[in-house]
Structures are given as structure tokens and as C-alpha cells.
Amino acid sequence: MRILVVEDELKISQYTAQVLSTLGYIPELANSGQRARDLFAINDYGLVILDLMLPDDDGLSLCKDFKTQKPTTPILMLTTLSEIHDKVQGLNSGADDYMTKPFHVEELTARVRVLLRRHQGTSHNLKCADLEMDLVKRQVLRAGQNIKLTTKEFSLLEYLLRNLGRPVTRVQIAQNVWDLHFDPESNVVDVYVKQLRKKIDSNADKKLIKTIVGMGYVINHE
Ligand code: CA
């Protein structure tokens, strides 16, 4: 899952990104309001972490605009202690939760998990036939058997399952599972799909991940 981190303080954005990566999410950084707007318009994020004070924009108006464009995307607002009086304003602008800087890894982890759980409701479970993925526990089961995936394999499977029955191109996979600067000419997508297949399909009679020749991949149980 991709998470947009809008923060102009490099130390905080890098720290946040590092924590999110460790948790298995894909952080994308925007150091200005404009960059955040550009990224938000073209990508789908599971969550936005938004700094209140940006050099070129105001986090509150950004928050309002994001909520107008994509009301279901949760927003976690970052403030410093001195800005805490803006909390009420922030919640009025549609922010789902608040966190005061500086914060500890445990707090960030907890808030991100709670927000995602609340927003995904029961859909934190993805499923295809006897393949089940629990996004909160970060657990994958095939026919009840636990399957250990790497962070990237997990993200790849999540992306395929979110597009259940809908073929996705290598470029779409690359952009959603890796990052914007990924070279679509490289064969890394195919390499990872092969690894993923080995783990989830090789011992099963029914193969779920299918190749669409000349296009990409699809997961389904037809
Ligand atoms: Ca700031």
C-alpha cells in the first residue's frame, strides 16, 4: 500500500518513510504542497500523512481539497506542539487523526494501523479462492497454510488482489509496487511474479496468478 508523506522537514519525512517501509508500506514523499497535489491527483494512496505547515501551502486547505477529491482516503495530520490549538480546525477540515511532532515510531505505527483498519473496515482481508491476505496482521494463507512473503512480494500480491479479476500491466505494477522512478523496461516485475507464484501457486492444483501475454498479469480463480 502506498502512503503519501507530505512534509518539508527532511529529517521527519525520511524518518517517517523509514518507519513506513519497515512496516511494509510504500512511502512517497512530497516536500511541498504543490508536489503533494500533483502526486495525489494521479495516484491512489491508502493514507496521507500531512504536515500542517508547508512552505508553499497550508496543510488545512490541502486537507480540505484532498477530502473533496477523494473523501475515503484517510489523512493523518502532523503538527508541532505550538500548533496544537489548530487541532480543532484540522479536524474540521476533514483530518481523521492528529499526531504531534516529534513522535516515536510506536506512535506512528499505532496511528497508521488504527486509521487503516478503521477505513478499510472489513476489507482489510483480501481473498481469491483459498488464498487469503490479512493486511493488518500482514499474513497470507493458502488453503489455511501460512505463507511467508517478503515485503515486496506482499505488496505485489496485495496490488494483484486489489485488482482481482482485472488484468494489470507491468508498468502499473511497477508504479504501484515500486516507485515512480522505476524503469518499466527492467524485468524485475517478472522476477517477483515468478517468486510469488512459486510461493502461492506451486503447491496448489489451482493456479491463481495468470500471465496475459504481451500485457501483464491477473489474479483470479476462473
Ligand atoms: Ca513543516
Image (cartoon, grey):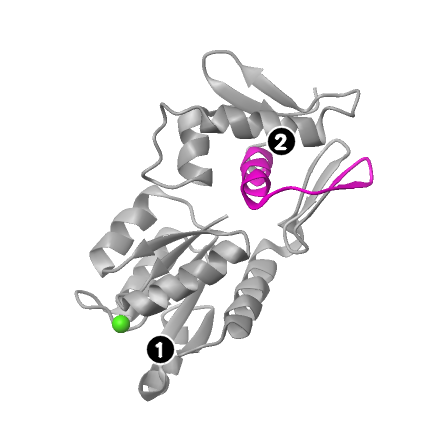
Question: With 197 as the anchor, is 14 left or right in this view?
Answer: left
Against 89, residue 216 (above or below) is above
Q: Position of residue 181 (x, y in %)?
A: 31, 38
Confirm whether residue 33 shows in the render. Answer: yes
User: Residue 11, how many percent across, how many down?
Assistant: 32, 68
Judged from this view, the residue extending furthest toward the left is 56
Inspect the image, locate mark 2, and give the three-letter code of the amino acid beneath it: Leu
| SS category of the residue bearing label 1 | strand
Q: Which mark is residue 168?
A: none
Residue 67 vs 126, above or below: the answer is below
Q: Residue at point 36% right, 62% down?
A: 14
Ligand 1, image quadrant it occupies? bottom left
Identify the element where label 2 is drawn: helix
Chain part drawn in magenta = 141-161
Instruction: Specify whether residue 145 is painted magenta.
Output: yes
Residue sitting farthest toward the right? 144
Q: Which residue does the numbered mark 1 point to in the structure image?
A: 79
| 184 shown above or below 59 | above
Three-letter amino acid code at the position of disc 1: Thr
Mark 1 close to ligand 1, CB under 8 Å? no
Point out the residue furthest to the top here: 213
Query: Number of labelled discs?
Result: 2
Q: Is 137 left or right of 81, judged from the image as shown? A: right
> Dot 2 surroundings within 10 Å: few (below 14), some, or many (20 or more)?
many
Say whether residue 92 is visible.
no
Quarter occupied by the C terminus = top right
* Quadrant housing residue 220: top right
Q: Position of residue 206 (x, y in %)?
A: 76, 21
- In the picture of the structure, the residue carrying the numbered disc 2 is 196
Q: Residue at x 39, y 70 (%)?
A: 77
Between 4 and 187, which is closer to the camera in this rendering? 187
